[in-house]
Image (cartoon, helix red, strand yellow):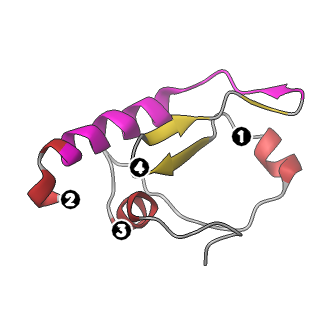
Amino acid sequence: QTEGLLKGVVCDYLLKNNLKGITFKEAPITLPEIFKADEVFVTNSLIGALPVVQIDEHYFERKTIANLVRDFLWEKFAEADNF
């Protein structure tokens, strides 16, 4: 179930595949729960993964997972027939 957004190819791929031991899941989440996160990112087919830097007055410093996901997806995009 997508929470108010269109289900995308990148999101679907991440949900079905582990990335270096990271398992992704999609679930409803509240804004206070998001503020507790170490890191937040969004995905799309053009960029792959984009770190969220700020929501309202809350800043997210870590971008480790987003960068890992982005690099992994760009490798898969380059291998187009494996994606």
Residue at horizontal 62%, vertical 72%? 2
How far apart are labels 2 and 4 at the CA level? 18 Å
16 left or right of 79? right
Q: Which mark is residue 37?
A: 1
Residue type marked 1: Ala
Residue type marked 4: Ile
Residue at horizontal 46%, vertical 65%? 8
User: Looking at the image, is 12 positioned above or below residue 83?
Assistant: below
Residue type marked 2: Phe
How far apart are labels 2 and 3 at the CA level? 12 Å
Can you tell which of label 2 and label 3 is closer to the viewer?
A: 2
Range of magenta residues: 57-77
Q: Which mark is residue 83?
A: 2
Task: Name the chief secondary structure element in magenta.
Answer: helix
How far apart are labels 1 and 4 at the CA level? 16 Å
Q: Is residue 22 magenta?
A: no
